[in-house]
Every structure is written in structure tokens, then in C-alpha cells.
Image (cartoon, rainbow, N blue to C red):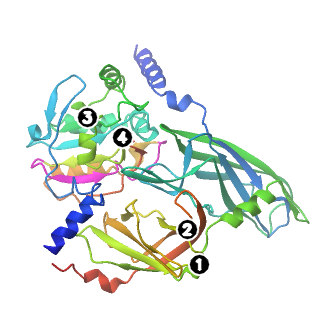
Amino acid sequence: MGNLRLLTMVACLALATPLSAAAPKTKAHLFLSAESARPGETIMAAVELRMPGNWHTYWRNPGDAGQPTQIDWQLPPGLTAGEIQWPAPKKYVTPPLTTYVYHTNAVLLVPLHLSNDVPLGAKEIRATVSWMECDHVCSLGHSAVSARLTVGDRSQPGPGASLISATKKKLPQTGEALSARARWEKPLDGESRQLLIEGQTVTPAAFIDFYPYDSENYEFSGETDLLEAGASKWALRKRIDKLSGDWPRQIKGLIVAGARSSGIAEAYEIELALDGAREGSTGID
Amino acid sequence: MKKLIAVLSLALAGQLSLFAAAQVGKPAPDFTAKDIEGKTHSLSDFKGKIVVLESYNLDCPFVLNHYKTGAMQALQQEVTGKGGVWLVVNSTHETHPNYRSPEAAKKEFKEQKMKATAWLHDSDADIGRKYAMRTTPHMYVINEEGVLVYQGAIDDRASASGDPKQARNYVREAIGKLRQGEQVTVATTKPYGCTVKYAN
């Protein structure tokens, strides 16, 4: 009797979870920059996600909701995977929420390093890719992907070589050319502050924004006040809400620029120190 | 005066709309809403009791995972079984595919073996806006004096799969502190999950 009840319960749960059974809308594929490589080399892997229609997957900082795509590698001995190199996402505003997403297509690059003593021969490179995908509704998807690599005495480009070199060109560049700076404006209140980020214009752009990387103790507001986007200088304001602990001493993220919000042409990674001396300053009545 | 103008202009610009409403350490905004049985509840009815608000949408994989593993129901039981109040708030707009009619909601409440006090209909987003509910699940804990003492994620495990019972549950922690007459130490965290399906 107890077993029957348990079985009924399990059956009910199964019926109540139609999402898990549905096939994911996003398709994942794995490509490698090399078909064969030598010990000690680092090759590049590309996980390509293709999303139909309005379906989207999430950036490293999903924003107010969502979940970043995850890659769990199952690598042969002698190979190690590096961090995901994320392309610039699209800022997706559905008031009052802001998320950072990819529509249509996203290529996530991951360096794979071959140790000096990696065993030679044919290898199967495998990974499980998991993501959250949303349209009007959200669901989870995952897919096992694999690709072949021969480790030997020569290097040869693989089927992913052109996709990977094209993707690399579009990755966020180093933000040094921007000469960016950040400083606190006067605090709004105890848990909320305004941050001014400014820098030098590299390519004139009508639209400039800051996409923060994820953080535990504080969060950026989705909205950005673009104060200036001139020929020589740009400036924008973000609000930071503190959740716990101390105010950040540095911020990290992307400065994106383009002709309009839907047409981001360039992205720069910045990591800026914040002037701690201003922390004590108060507003004037 | 200058400050007041500054605050007002910010509010008008919509800057504060998301956070001005419910604030940790301040009285929780009152609301009145109908539950799926047609009964009306106001937050002020529950003065003297610990109240938990849970923004809910079972079609969100994060929420689903907390229910299919039984973790959410177990936590609801811990609260309502000891004189506390647990309000499930469904702010999904009527036009959204995840919307539940009262009949569908009643069925779901039963099927999921929910141990909540009530499931509130909030498709006009009144509670959602007052509390700036961002995700499902987005959790709120209100103390016996009606002060909001916690808002944010349900736990420190922002995942839609696996076992939530392994996580550090902030709601359980906050309620434990309240019941021991102690200060809630982790009072605000970043909520995770799916966006609340408001009208867009």
C-alpha cells in the first residue's frame, strides 16, 4: 500500500512537470580550432548555441533573472579547460526588469590546454552544456556535445577554425584605450549610491552603456543615465544598491558602444578602482 | 529642500520605482488581495505573526525545482505549522501563458501539496509592484511587528536543478533568528530565478 502511494505520488509529480520533458529550443554544438595539436599547445573550443525566434539564453551576469550557461567538461587526461570567454550580450529590458541575453546565436569560447605529457593519439572531447532559455516562458535545457582531436606531432586547423577566429574578433577588447575612471557621486541613502563612469571616446558612438559583471554583495540598477557621448568624452551614471558587507572597491564589466542600443558595435572590458576617500562624503541639504 | 526636490525628481524619473516600495527595516507595505478560494486577506490582518511572501510561478524552472524536490513545501510547513503565515503571491499577468485561473490554481495547490496559508491572486501586480518582486522565487520575511526583515533569494544556490535542501536557506535562517528573538543577520540578498511575468 505504501509503495502504491509512493508510486502515485511520483506519477503525479511527473505529470505536474511538463517542462522537464519538453525538448529544448536551443541547440548546442561543439567545434574545435584544431583537428590535431601537439603537447603543450592551447587550442580553442567553441560552444555554439542557436536559439530560434525570440528565445534567448543568458550572459555571465544574467541580470535581474535567468541563469548563465554552464559548460561541464569531460576531458581526457592531460587536457584542461580554461574560463569561458563571453561575447558581449544584449541588454534586454522588460520593465521593471533588466537581463543580459543572447538571441539567435551565441558562441562561447573556451581555451583547452594540452599538457606537455599528454598521451598521444585520438581523443574525444566531451562536455555537457546546460542553459536556461526563455521566450515568454522559461525552461532549462542541456545537451551533451563532443568533438574529435588528435594529439600528435603536428598542428592542423579544425572545422571550428574560421568560426573561432571570427568570434575572437568580436570579443570584448581590453578597455585601456578608453582611459575610463569611476567615482562615487554623493550617496543617495544608506544602501544606494550613484556611480559615475567616464572615459575617452575611441570611436564616436551615440549609445554607450555599462554591463556589469555579477557580484554578490551589491548590484547595479538596470537603468543607465547616459550623460554625455561626445566626440572626445563619454560619461554615464549607474546606481548601485548594496546588499551586504562593504561598498565595492572596484567594479568590473563591459563598456559597450554603438549607433543605438540595438546595434552594439564594440565592447571593452574594464576593471576600475573606486576612490575610497569619497565613501565618507555626505549629501548637502 | 534641495534634497527633497532631488528625491522627487529621481522618483519621477522612475529611478526609485523598483526599490522605493518595500525596504528592509521599514514597515512592510500593506496590501489587500483575494486568494484562490475567493477569500480576502490584508497583510495587516496578520500583525503579531511572522509572514512570508513567496513570488510564485510553477512554470519557472527555479520554482519548479523547489516544489518537485519538496523543499518549498517543507519550509512552508515549518512556518505555518508553528503559527506563521505563508502567502504565495502569483503576479503572472492574465495574458501570459503561465497564468493560472482560480480553478487551475486550486488544482495546482492541491497537486503540489502546498502548505501555504493562502495563494493570492495578484495578476494586476499590486503586491508585485509594492514589494518590487523581480523574480520567481523572490522571498520576503515580515516580523511580528509588521517590519520587513528579509528580502531576496530563497537560498544561496541559484540553480534550477539539484537538491535545494543542501543549500543555505536565507528564509529559514531569518525565521530562526526571529523565533530566537535575535537580529536577522543576512537581511538582503540578490534574488534569482525567472522574471515575474508582468504585463509588458
Q: Are marks 4 and 3 on the same chain?
A: yes
Q: CA distance from mark 1 to mark 4?
A: 39 Å
Q: Give amino acid for label 3.
A: Gln
SS at mark 3 in the image = helix
Q: What element does badge 4 sit on?
A: loop
Query: Circle 4 is placed at which residue position?
Result: B198
> Residue A165: horizontal and vertical position, in percent?
76, 63
Q: Could you tell me which residue is drawn at 68 percent across and 43 percent down?
A: A144
* Distance from Cα at disc 4 to Cα at disc 3: 28 Å
Label 4 or label 3, whichever comes before in sequence order = 3
Counting other residues with Cα less than 10 Å from the Cα at mark 2, is it few (<14), some (14-19), or many (20 or more)? Answer: many
For residue A257, the mark is 2
- Left or right placement of residue A174 versus residue A79 in this view: left
Query: Which of A167 and B28 lies nearest the eye of the viewer?
Result: A167
User: Can residue A274 be seen?
Assistant: yes
Which residue lies under the disc numbered 3?
A: B77
